[in-house]
Image (cartoon, rainbow, N blue to C red):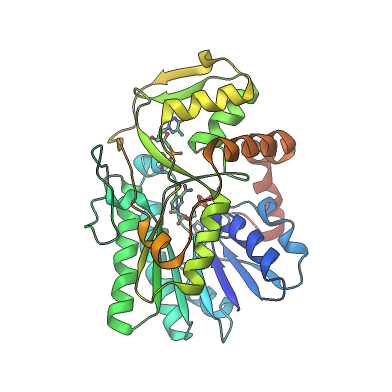
Amino acid sequence: MALFITGGAGFIGSAFIRTWIERYPAETVINFDKLTYAGNLDNVAEAARHPTYRFIHGDICDAEALRAAIPDGCDAIVHFAAESHVDRSILSAREFILTNVLGTQVLLDVAREKGVRRFLHISTDEVGGSLPEGRFFREDDPLVPSSPYAASKAAAEHLVRAAAHTFGLDAVITRTSNNYGPYQFPEKLIPLALTNALENRPIPVYGDGQQVRDWIHVDDNCAALRVVLEKGQPGATYHIGGRSPLPNRTVLLTLLDLLGKPASLLTEVADRLGHDRRYAVDCSRIERELGWRPQIPFVEGLAQTIAWYREHPTWVARARSGEYRQYYARMYGAL
Ligand code: NAD
Ligand code: TYD
């Protein structure tokens, strides 16, 4: 299967590439990435040594670049590329609309032109908005996003469904809950808290810290994505959850406990604007129809993640200082 991956230098895309190559070493994998602040080629350094892997520097908003990059006979596009951080979308939504909305449409158009056989669109549980205790977001529920990030991802999904409905594109959509694991950029809760704690620096807790997220290890997510890519019904949407719903404060106290660091590092700060209180996906469809289930218990996955960050101080230092971007600037020109 020849795969065209967008956003494969980011956190989840790079994990998908690593785990795909491990299983299917003979198959072509093209990683098309703009290398924004979140794209880090250090994440795919091992894949780069593999003969069937190729990296192409490009923007999904650029139709010409996509036409040149997507190979004839491409079996599938796996579309990870996005602006992905809620706090940044609150500061400025512009890049979110460009990449997540316009970029997705451009990619859909070129995918059709090129006759790509399957389009796997990576979405998020955040399109379902904040849910009261006891309610779960199901695949057929209406989308009620509340942050600019979530709104841009909801718009992208609508465009994917419209392409499937109007043009018969074989598209499948996944909505995953909060991922954690190695190589996650230290702006999201777990890697930010972990890297701060390792240096005994304070950990910002937004508001009362009782917001609930369902945590899934990135390797469990990648296993689910492979199953959906290979066996998902055309036009279907699948929720992927970790079955580990936890308030932020509990996540942070567990992390500090595993690290042997004091709870006094937790520092309440002003709440995020419009902060969604609770996300909760019902992931019974993928479990029932495709036989996937999360395998990595949260505390075990968190301990593995801690070990990885401890063992990779150079990756952490380069990610935090932005040094990895200077290296790209030499390779690909100014970013
Ligand atoms: P990330 O921010 O780590 O990586 C995004 C990647 O996309 C980067 O490599 C970046 O350079 C690339 N990119 C950005 N704009 C681009 C453009 N215009 N053209 C080409 N490449 C571009 O994100 P992530 O956490 O790996 O998330 C991947 C996908 O999964 C996103 O679509 C995100 O919305 C979705 N998702 C993430 C989570 C999570 O917990 N991280 C949960 C649910 C869904
Ligand atoms: P985040 O990792 O940004 O993911 P998302 O907002 O997409 O769920 O944040 C996870 C939760 O942690 C969210 O409720 C916001 C909160 N949070 C903090 O309390 N402090 C922080 O420094 C960050 C980055 C997030």
Q: Is residue 235 above or below residue 212?
A: below
Q: Is residue 320 visible?
A: yes
Find residue 174 and report its horizontal and vertical position in percent: 41, 61
Q: Position of residue 263 (x, y in %)?
A: 52, 16
Quarter of the image where the C terminus is located: bottom right
> Quarter of the image containing the N terminus?
bottom right
Residue situated in front as seen by the camera: 229 or 9? 229
Spot occupied by residue 231 in the image (x, y as percentages of width and height): 47, 73
Viewer-nearest residue: 187 or 165: 165
What residue appears at the point 45 percent right and 69 percent down from the top-left corner? 120
Q: Where in the figure is residue 326, as x and y percent of width and height?
A: 68, 47
Quadrant observed for ligand 2 in the rendered image = top left
Towards the viewer: 56 or 133: 133
Q: How many marks?
A: 0
- Asked which quadrant contains residue 317, the reply is top right
The image quarter in which residue 139 lies: bottom left
Instruction: Relative to 206, say whether 32 is above or below.
Output: below
Q: Tell me what residue is drawn at x 57 percent, y 15 percent.
A: 262
Residue depicted at x 64% and y 60%:
19
- Compared to residue 182, the image places residue 21 above or below, namely below
Evaluate whether residue 36 shows in this view. Answer: no
Residue beneath the point at 63% across and 51% down: 40
